[in-house]
Image (cartoon, helix red, strand yellow):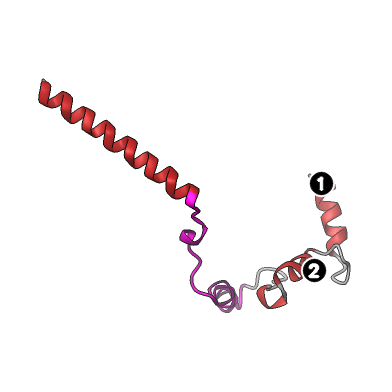
Amino acid sequence: MDRRLKGYREQNANTASDKNIIKFFINHITASNCMTVSGPDSENAKATIAKMQGLLEKNGKPCCLNLITEADNKFMAKLAKEKRIQEEILAEQMREA
């Protein structure tokens, strides 16, 4: 772990380096979608959090519904069907008893 942290610190010490993590994100999601915070800012914590929230929610509030795929919907439908079948079997057994 210490070796990895040392390597990370060395690669990220120079912000002009191509291996810098900030450059990685800027190249992949553009600078307008990135925010750099140097460290905790106890005096302006609320302002920093508000900036972060603004950046994260600029296209609307993040929602897990945007990540649900058709395969997820099929899986959930299968679970609902299995539950319904189990309830019908239980109801049938109760009627017979």
User: Percent x, y for residue 26?
Assistant: 75, 71
Q: Residue at position x 28%, y 33% from top?
A: 85
Q: Is residue 66 left or right of residue 43?
A: left
Q: Amino acid at mark 1?
A: Asp
N-terminal-most mark, 1 or 2: 1
Local secondary structure at mark 2: helix
Within 10 Å of disc 2 (Cα), the crowding (few <14, some 14-19, many 20+) is some
Residue in front for this viewpoint, 50 or 64: 64
The residue at the point 85 percent across, 62 percent down is 19
Q: Position of residue 37 (x, y in %)?
A: 69, 71
> How many numbered tags mark residues here?
2
**Residue at the outermost top position:** 97
Please determine whether, in this image, residue 84 is positioned above or below residue 8.
above
Q: Amino acid at mark 2?
A: Lys
Q: Position of residue 90 (x, y in %)?
A: 21, 28
Q: Nearer the viewer, mark 1 or mark 2?
A: 2
Q: Nearer the viewer, residue 80 or 36?
A: 80
Q: Which residue is mark 1?
A: 2
> How many neighbours does mark 1 have within 10 angstroms: few (below 14), some (14-19), or many (20 or more)?
few
Residue numbers of the magenta segment: 42-70
Q: Quadrant of residue 13?
A: bottom right
Which numbered disc covers residue 72?
none
Residue indicated by mark 2? 23
Quarter of image, res 11: bottom right
The residue positioned 32% from the left and 39% from the top of the image is 81
State how far apart marks 1 and 2 are (Cα): 23 Å
Q: Residue at x 54, y 75 (%)?
A: 59
Taking the magenta stretch, the answer to whether it contains residue 55 is yes
